[in-house]
Image (spheres, helix red, strand yellow):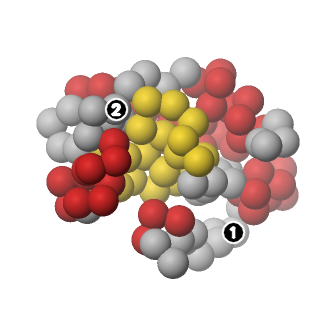
Amino acid sequence: MSPLFRRKPAQPRPPEHSEHSEKHLVTLIRKPGCHLCDDAQLVVEKVCAELGVPWEGKDITEDRQLHDQYWEQIPVVLVDGRQHTFWRVNEERLRKALTDQYK
């Protein structure tokens, strides 16, 4: 299985968060020195913390496949391995994707 889609071990969450954390994983694909990536990470951290959803960061400078696939779009946010957005992360849209049935 690709490291991109590998989930981290489940962390204990308060009961109100467990519904979302079991269903989703957010991945932020970024590179060092990218101001849009820094902005995106703030939004991802905030929304994921509020909902108890795990998230992980991937650096395109350390993964050739990610670089080839996303270098023109970073930062890229994946929800459950599917591209959710790129360049700018809308807090409300990310929250909706994580709280609604993501299909």
**In the image, is residue 47 above or below residue 58?**
above
Quadrant of the rendered structure where residue 97 is? top right
Residue type at mark 2 is: Gln
Q: CA distance from mark 1 to mark 2?
A: 33 Å
Residue 63 point in image, percent of width and height: 25, 61
Relative placement, left or right, of 23 versus 82 is right
Q: Which residue is mark 1?
A: 12
Q: Nearer the viewer, residue 103 or 97?
A: 103
Could one spot residue 6 in this view of the protein?
A: yes
Q: Is residue 4 above or below residue 52?
A: below
**Callout 1 crowding tier (Cα within 10 Å): few <14, some 14–19, many ≥20:** few
* Quarter of the image where the C terminus is located: top right
Q: Nearer the viewer, mark 1 or mark 2?
A: 2
Question: Who's the residue at 83% across and 55% down the image?
Answer: 19
Q: Amino acid at mark 1?
A: Pro
Q: Which residue is mark 2?
A: 73
Which SS class for mark 2? loop
Residue at image position (59%, 48%) is 82
